[in-house]
Image (cartoon, helix red, strand yellow):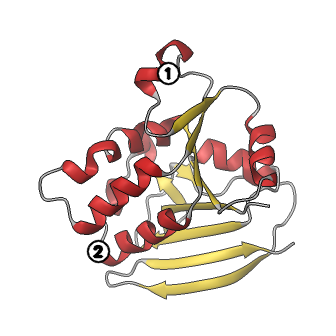
Amino acid sequence: MRRLIYGMNLTLDGYIAAPGDDIGWSGPPSPELFRWWLELEQASGMSLYGRKLWETMSSYWPTGDQQPGATPAEIEFARTWRDTPKVVFSSTIDNADNDATLDWNTRLVTGDAIAEITRLKAEDGAPMNIGGATLAAAAMRAGLIDEYVIAAHPVLVGGGTPFFTALDSWVRLDLLETRTLPGGVVLSRYETRR
């Protein structure tokens, strides 16, 4: 059975984006933080995206290795990102545009996201990453998240898009790893206690 990992950069008050989808608070990642995200991407067998995160990622990473000044880690991330199978969950991406819109080893799911994620988890294979607040919230409420990966930045934004969603019951977690990077970013990994 595959593990499902939800990881994002977030503010100390728990938001992945400030009002207006502003992620400027995270700034460019330090080399250490970028390397950490790269290692998680390399360990993933599949990435699951909501529409908004897909649009953000697909606007840069298909050619991220060809950008002027791309670091070796960015080149490696772009290549890994392109090669990793991806599933985009969206009811608003036009199916007629699939060839132009979804490329780079990606397929579109317009139906029941929870049913498809449950099916994918039942398969053998490397862990899957899930990203996008709405998609991850649905998986969280369904009890499908096995691990939470957090890069907490030392900033408060007071509102926006939360990392965690409201739940009907408690979810107990076990700390797997924590460390602090220069600049005060705290990296943490938690496993869902089953």
- In three-dimensional space, the C-alpha distance between marks 1 and 2, rounded to whole angstroms, equals 34 Å
Residue 134 in which image quadrant: top right
Front residue of 60 and 161? 60
* Kind of residue sitting beneath label 2: Pro
Pointer 1 or 2: first along the chain = 2
Horizontal and vertical percent for residue 149? 58, 69
Residue beneath label 1, please? 98
Q: Secondary structure at mark 1?
A: helix
Q: Are marks 1 and 2 in contact (CB under 8 Å)?
A: no
The answer to whether 134 appears left or right of 123 in the picture is left
Residue pictured at 42% horizontal, 52% vertical = 81
**Mark seen at residue 57:** none
Front residue of 145 and 116? 116
* Kind of residue sitting beneath label 1: Asn
Residue 116 in which image quadrant: top right
**Can the viewer see residue 28?**
no
Position of the N terminus, as image quadrant, is bottom right
Front residue of 106 and 26? 106
| Crowd class of label 1 (few under 14; some 14 to 19; many from 20; radius 10 Å) | few
Count of labels in the image: 2
Residue 148 in which image quadrant: bottom right
Residue pictured at 81% horizontal, 74% vertical = 172
Residue beneath label 2, please? 31
The answer to whether 172 appears left or right of 26 in the picture is right
Residue pictured at 34% horizontal, 54% vertical = 78
